[in-house]
Amino acid sequence: MTRQTKLIIPKKKAQNLTDVAYDAIKHMIIYNEIGAGEFLSENVLAQALNMSRTPVREALKILASENLVEIHNGIGIFVPNITTREVHELFEVRSALECAAVKSFLKNVTEEDLTEMEKSWIESKEKLEAGIEVSYEDLAGSDHKLHALILDKSDNLIMQDIMHSIRQRIQRIQALSISKFPYQSVTIQQHLDIIQAIREKNEEEVKRLLAEHILFAENNVLKDPDFHL
């Protein structure tokens, strides 16, 4: 790491040290606290997490399998850059999977699911309208939960497996999209519109809104002049 970073360790019961290290390092990568191209030191991470290098090393191996870090033997461990092609291809796959999952998702989603999702977006909207800052991490978290729900509540297990294999990379780009642009009110309303269409069981409208929202998020990332592709 090239700069001092505050580690945020999610609290979980019966969590082993590899899980602790994995969650903390993943959080920093997804929310760009460790930027693309940065070098990761096992020693620095272990000291910051107050643990030995072994669980840190194991956590980094898991993150490498998810393409969130790159391990180059004899050179070091780095956070990979995000390329234009990767953004486009991941969001193209994401749009196709989520839209394909809508039909069975609508049969399985409950009012409780929607109420819980809607609550966080309404709270964010009310804060914004009151002039209160809304954390981009909170928005990114709400965004991830809603989109994950669509696949998790579908009947297609293969689509779930495919999304699971790329979910962390997509989440990293989602967080980057939300953090970079002053379009919070737009993305909040987009999600509320999606939730309303889901509640009305309007399959075609849900698909249309999802596709538009995902394209909007992709364009947010690609238009950022500070985003090195």
Image (cartoon, rainbow, N blue to C red):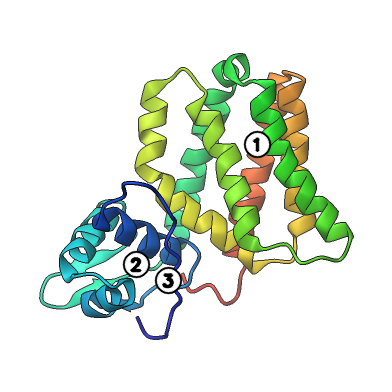
Q: Are marks 3 and 2 in contact (CB under 8 Å)?
A: no
Sooner in the amino-acid sequence: mark 1 or mark 3: 3
* Quadrant assignment, res 110: top right
Q: Nearer the viewer, residue 44 or 203?
A: 44
Q: For the image shown, how many numbered marks are present on the structure?
A: 3
**Horizontal side of residue 143 vs 51, given as left or right:** right
How far apart are the two marked residues, 3 and 2, measured between alpha carbons?
A: 20 Å
**Horizontal side of residue 158 vs 224, given as left or right:** left
**Horizontal side of residue 178 vs 130, given as left or right:** left
Label 3 amino acid? Leu
Sooner in the amino-acid sequence: mark 2 or mark 1: 2
Residue 161 versus residue 156 in the image, above or below: below
Give the percent coordinates (x, y) of residue 126. Answer: 84, 52
Sooner in the amino-acid sequence: mark 3 or mark 2: 3
Residue in the picture at 29% in, 74% down: 45
Residue in the picture at 46% in, 69% down: 229
The residue under label 1 is 210
- Label 1: which secondary element: helix
Q: Is residue 83 visible?
A: no
Q: Is residue 161 visible?
A: yes
Give the percent coordinates (x, y) of residue 41. Answer: 25, 78
Residue in the picture at 68% in, 35% down: 116
**Horizontal side of residue 200 vs 87, given as left or right:** right
Question: Which residue lies most toward the front here?
Answer: 13
Label 2 amino acid? Pro
Label 1 amino acid? Leu
Residue 75 versus residue 82 in the image, above or below: below
The residue under label 3 is 7
The residue under label 2 is 80
